[in-house]
Amino acid sequence: MENDVGHEIAEALGILLRRTTRAELHKRLTEGMGEAVDEVTYPVLSALARTGPRSAAELAPDAGVDRSGVTRRASRLEAAGLIRREVDPTDRRAHLLVLTEEGEAAVTELRARLAAHIMRSLSAWPPGEAASFARQLRRFTAEGPFA
């Protein structure tokens, strides 16, 4: 029985963690956000919002792409005014990627879209089930295999 639950959770996580699943979600969320914000740049913008100012190399693991991928995507976001590069105060040779006010506004919009998308998908669930799922998912991420 317990092993079956583990397999069921592992299968569901496999679907959630697939790159294609994330890319399709990011494509839906970024629709109409402007040329620079799309399923390719979304992970960099989102990761930067979660982590705060970082170098491309430091941001790469959180964005799920390598340093050069972060750099290319950051260049698009910078050209659109959503991020800027600042000299790293701890290493004058390095630069940090920093969200601009416009970038913060874009992230706020994207997070609102994601929350609304999630709530629409849960609208048919019985009352209280979505809140219980949210609590359990938070606990799983805090105490489970990804902690």
Image (spheres, grey):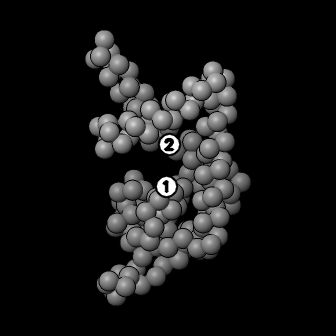
Residue 27 or 145: which is nearer the viewer? Answer: 145
Question: Where residue 7 appears, x then y in whole percent?
Answer: 33, 21
Q: Is residue 30 visible?
A: no
Residue placed furthest toward the right? 32
Distance of mark 1 from mark 2, alpha carbons? Answer: 9 Å
Point 34% across, 67% down: residue: 57
| Residue at image point 52% right, 44% down | 23
Q: In this figure, which residue is indicated by the disc labeled 2?
A: 22
Determine which quarter of the picture holds residue 24: top right
Q: Label 2 sits on what residue type?
A: Arg
Left/right placement of residue 103 relative to residue 90 reads: right
- Rendered-image quadrant of the C terminus: top left
Numbered badge on residue 43: 1
- Position of the N terminus by quadrant: top left
What's the residue at 32%, 22% (across, down)?
Answer: 6
In this rendering, the answer to whether 110 lies above or below 54 is above
* Residue contact at pointers 1 and 2, CB within 8 angstroms: yes
Above or below 57: residue 84: below
Residue 92 can be seen, yes or no: yes
